[in-house]
Structure formats: structure tokens, C-alpha cells
Image: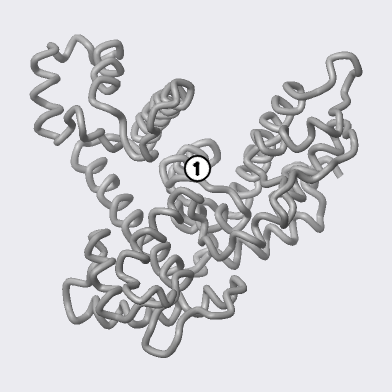
Amino acid sequence: FVLLSRRREGFRQDECAKMQHLFERFDVDESGEINALELIDLFRHLGHRLTLDEVHVFLRQVDENESNCLDFPEYLRLMRLHREDELRRISAVFNEFADPHEVEVLPGLRVPYALEQLGHDTTDPSGKRKSYKPENFEGFVQLADACRASSVAKDRRKAGFSDARIGELRMAFRRYDKNHSGDIDNNELLMILADFNWQPRSREEQSQLVQKLETATQRAQEAGVRDAGRPSEIGFWTFVQLARMLETEHEQSEDEAVHALMVDLGFSQKEVDDFRAIFLDKLHEVLQEQDETNTQVMRLSGLPCEDVKRLVLKGSHAASFSKQQLDVELKNLGCTANMPLEF
């Protein structure tokens, strides 16, 4: 029994069966392994919004052979670690809002605020906060899980994008929807794609775009969108699904570029993963500081120039650079006061 439990990473047999089915669904090339891009799609399907760099950090924790892919046992181990991280976060929020005069009890009036702290919507269709009964920790975990499951079903049409990103896409869409019909034609779509630097650059890419549009329409319909667009026109939620496909392609090209750079510079996968973890830790620190001071929060894509300098000059490579040399290197990389440095 103990051996079986270890093989299943503590999950029940029925839970393992569901995970196996999900793993096989996102193992697109049927290789028996899933790579970082397949894993990020899997996490989005489960309702977790992660960046590609964050997924790489997760991979590093369980990818024992440094293949940059996960087989099913490694995937199970990852899901256990991710669940433990999730429970730690839920526990911290529970303790923050729990009644100080009653041990292990979250008052009903505080439950919606605690759930909102975890990123869940607690309003009813009229916009008012729902009412909740007091919960112990186990009950609060079940409630948080139920909220995430509900939001997954509602947000599938968003294709894993945040509300802020959906807002950006909607603004771009409306800019070219001249008659406010809710649809755009193919020429207007090409103008939007050019704004995002996604435009097709060859006949082959144009042909691929047509196929992607068909897939995007199908995915929008599967997500519950009744009107995905009239004939020869594209509805907004079809555009969102298309944007997800194009961003995934961009992420894949970036991932391949990082791997090529790793080989060119002679770094091991472990070294690159260590660099990525340091980079992300600093980036999250910067975002948290910006959030606390109510300044405009940049998108999770790069470190501001001054933070890069502080990170390098206090690190193990500090002796390798003078401040002037570092300024020159950053300028050569395109990192300025207005342009952050990507990983």
C-alpha cells in the first residue's frame, strides 16, 4: 500500500486516473512526455494562469533527467508540489482573515474577502457579494476549489488570459470594428494582427492563418460562445482564441531561442533554470513593490534597468563588471529606462 501510494504521489486511484487522462490529452505528439508549452496549456485548462518562465521553474523541481519534459510520474510529482504550494497560500489567507477569538474558524462575513484575496469572484449576477456561512480550514479549501472550478468553466472563453489582457484585446478589436457590429472582416483582422506584430508574412503563413481561424472558431464554440462570428467575419471571442494560439507560437519561438542561446553560451539546463528562478524572484519582488505603492504595474515580462543593475552588482558576478561596463552591456541589449530586460 505504501509503495502504491508513493507511486501515485499520495493521490487516490480515481484522482490518478483523471490526471492520466488529462496528461494524455495534452501530450499532443503522443510521446509519453509533455513539454513546457503543453504543460502551460494544461495548467490553463485547470484554471491556473502561469507564465512560461514560471512553468519552467516548476519543471526544474521534478525533471530529474533534465530533458525539459515530464513523463507521467514526474507530472504526478509536480501536481503534488503545486497542490502543496496552493494549500500553503490558502492557509496563509485563511489565517489572515480567521477570527482571532475563535481558533480555526473563518467568520461568514469574512469569507468573501478571503476568497477575493485568492483571486475568486464572490459576486452574484446582480453584482452584490454572496453570503457565506462560517468555515473551518477544510471547508474553506473545498470552497476555494469549488470557486476555481466554477471560474474555469466561466473563463474558458478567455483562453487563459487575465481580465487585463482581455481588456487590451477588446480595445484593439473595437478600434477596427467600425460599425460596432461585434464582428470584423478578414482585412480588419490583418490590421489588428499587425498591431500585435502577429501578421502573416508569407503565403504559407496566410494559409495557416485560415486554418487557425477555423480552429479558433471551434474552440470559441466549445467554450460556450453561441455567436462566434458570421460567415466571412470574426467575432471577438474567436479573436481571443486566435490570439492565444498566436501567443503560444510566440512563446514557443522564445523558448527555442533561449535553448539555442543556452547551447551557444555553454550553459547547462540546470544553470539556465537557476538563472530563471533568480530572475523571476526579483521580478515578483519588483511587481509587489509597485503594487504596494499603487503605481502602474508593468506586465510580467522584464526587469527594469535599475533593478537589473542592482541584481548584477550585488551578485557573484559583481567583480566582473564596473558600473560603466554594465551600462554599456545593458544598452547593447536594448535595456533602457523605458525598456525592461526580458529573461
33 or 318, which lies in front? 318
Whether residue 31 sits left or right of residue 315 in the image: it is right
| Residue at (59% x, 71% y) in the render | 223
| Residue at (37% x, 58% y) in the render | 171
> What amino acid does circle 1 point to?
Leu
Residue 195 picture quarter: bottom left
Query: Does residue 48 show up?
Result: yes
Give SS at disc 1. Answer: helix
Q: Residues within 10 Å of mark 1 (few under 14, many from 20)?
A: many
The residue labelled by disc 1 is 59
x and y, in percent, of residue 190 in the image: 25, 73
Query: Does residue 7 show up?
Result: no
| Residue at (29% x, 11% y) in the render | 314
**Quadrant for the C terminus in the image:** top left
271 or 108, which lies in front? 108
Asked if residue 29 is positioned above or below residue 151 in the image, the reply reads below
x and y, in percent, of residue 151 in the image: 66, 55
x and y, in percent, of residue 194 in the image: 22, 65
Asked if residue 236 is positioned above or below residue 105 in the image, the reply reads below
| Residue at (27% x, 23% y) in the render | 308
Residue 276 picture quarter: top left
Whether residue 62 sits left or right of residue 268 in the image: it is right
50 or 109, which lies in front? 109
Residue 99 picture quarter: top right
x and y, in percent, of residue 139 in the image: 86, 38
**Quadrant for the N terminus in the image:** top right
Q: How many marks?
A: 1
Q: Residue furthest bottom?
A: 231
